[in-house]
Image (cartoon, rainbow, N blue to C red):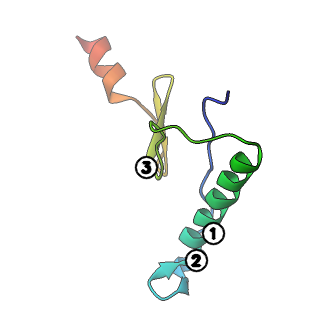
């Protein structure tokens, strides 16, 4: 049983270079990384549950939101503290 598997995006956007018409290179590489990860899960005989989430803008982990902007406080937690 594996609870969370993170497939992180790339650190570089290749100056928005297109790999295919309308598809930027960094997006294509991220999709390829995700595909490799899913194939490894399948080879291990595992499956992906219906609650799975893909292509999230950020992750909420222990009161912090991690995204392209870096680490920020989760507004849900801030509101609870204020109230």
Can you say whether 18 is above or below 9 in the image?
A: below
For the point 49% across and 79% down, the residue is 23
Mark 2 → mark 3, Cα distance in angstroms: 18 Å
- Looking at marks 2 and 3 on the same chain, the residue that comes earlier in the sequence is marked by 2
Mark-to-mark CA distance, 3 and 1: 17 Å
Q: Which residue is mark 2?
A: 25
Badge 2 element: helix
User: Which quarter of the figure has residue 31?
Assistant: bottom right
Q: Is residue 71 visible?
A: no
Residue at 47% x, 29% y is: 64
Quadrant, the N terminus: top right
Residue 20 percent across, percent down from the top left: 54, 86
Q: Is residue 34 left or right of residue 54?
A: right
Q: In the structure shown, which secondary structural element does the residue marked by tag 1 occupy?
A: helix
Image point 29% across, 14% down: which residue? Answer: 80
Of tags 3 and 1, the one toward the viewer is: 1
**Which residue lies under the disc numbered 3?**
57
Disc 1 residue crowd, few under 14, some 14–19, many 20+, Cα 10 Å: some
The quarter of the picture where the C terminus appears is top left
Front residue of this view, candidates 82 and 13: 13
* Above or below, 14 relative to 9: below
Q: Residue at 76%, 49% (x, y): give it.
A: 43
Within 10 angstroms of label 3, few (less than 14), some, or many (20 or more) residues? few
Q: How many marks?
A: 3
- Residues under numbered marks 1 and 2 in contact, where contact means CB atoms less than 8 Å apart: yes
- Residue denoted by label 1: 29
């Amino acid at each position: 049983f594996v609870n969370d598997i993170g497939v992180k995006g790339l650190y570089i956007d290749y100056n928005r270079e297109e790999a295919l018409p309308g598809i930027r290179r960094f997006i294509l590489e991220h999709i390829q990384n995700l595909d490799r990860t899913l194939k490894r899960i399948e080879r291990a005989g595992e499956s992906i549950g219906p609650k799975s989430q893909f292509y999230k803008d950020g992750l909420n982990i222990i009161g912090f939101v991690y995204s392209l902007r870096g680490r920020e406080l989760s507004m849900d937690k801030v509101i609870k503290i204020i109230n």
